[in-house]
Image (tube, rainbow, N blue to C red):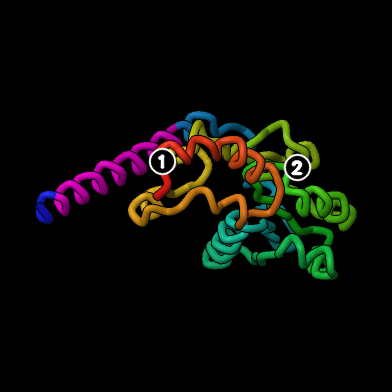
Amino acid sequence: MKKKSANSSKSSSLAAGRAVLAAETQALQAATARLDENFSRVVDLIQRASGKVVVVGLGKSGHVAHSVAATLCSLGTPAVYLHASEAAHGDIGIVGRGDVVILISKSGATPELVRLAPALRATGAKLVALVGNLRSPLAGEADAVLDASVAREADPLGLAPTWLLRKRRNFPWRILPERIPPGNWAAMLLYAWPMSCMGWTK
């Protein structure tokens, strides 16, 4: 019985893993298809910049921002990561005329980034928004916008980017509203929360 249960668990994990990879592959194919002159404009802004690239994000987008800044440095383009909240407490001083600032936000409405955008523009830096909503406040503030939207995320609620480990560990979805501060992402989660009571929680 235990062996059968173990085999069933492995089969379920493989199916979930393949579903995640399939969803992410589809997202990459869609991103490839919609790549347009905005991408070329961002590349041009970075190549022509007399200063550095400053990458800004918060939460999971902050981790992505860290990675982008590190990758640009590895490729010979001076870049730094700027924490959105810390920027409001003086760290914005690292941004200057001639810099290119990349603002990363899934919703495009992260309050800390939206409040920061006018101050960043006042420095004379060029703003690039990497967002999942082209009609968002950050998109409206930017000199160039990159579309990072996806049809759906790879989890049953369409919210979290990686579902596999949470499913494998029977992650209790009901506790997520307690862990995420109020905002668009949290609002979507609270909207979908009743779904998590239909079999996705322990």
Q: Residue at x 83, y 55 (%)?
A: 120
Bin the neighbour count of mark 2 within 10 Å (Cα to Cα): few under 14, some 14-19, many 20 and up.
many
Residue 154's spot in the image, x, y percent? 43, 41
Secondary structure at numbered mark 2:
helix
Determine the residue located farthest toward the right in the rendered image: 122
| Type of the residue with mark 2 | Leu
Q: Answer with left or right where residue 96 lies relative to residue 178.
A: right
Query: Dot 1 lies on which element?
Result: helix
Q: Is residue 168 magenta?
A: no
- The answer to whether residue 41 shows anywhere in this view is no
Q: Is residue 5 above or below residue 194?
A: below
Residue range (magenta):
5-29
Considering only order in the chain, which callout, 1 or 2, is on the residue closer to the N terminus? 1
The residue lying toward the viewer, choosing from 52 and 147, is 147
Q: Is residue 81 left or right of residue 149?
A: right
User: Considering only vertical position in the picture, is 198 above or below 14?
Assistant: above
Residue on which the image places disc 2: 138
Which label number is shown at residue 36? none
At 87% from the left and 58% from the top, the residue drawn is 123
Q: Residue at x 48, y 40 (%)?
A: 196
Q: Amino acid under label 1?
A: Glu
Quadrant in the picture for residue 116: bottom right
Provide residue 15's location: percent of width, then percent of height.
Answer: 26, 41
Dominant SS of magenta comes to helix
The residue labelled by disc 1 is: 24
Whether the magenta-drawn stretch holds residue 21 is answered as yes
Q: Position of residue 188 (x, y in %)?
A: 62, 38
Q: How many marks?
A: 2
> Residue 110 vs residue 40: left or right?
right
Pick the front one: 174 or 158: 174
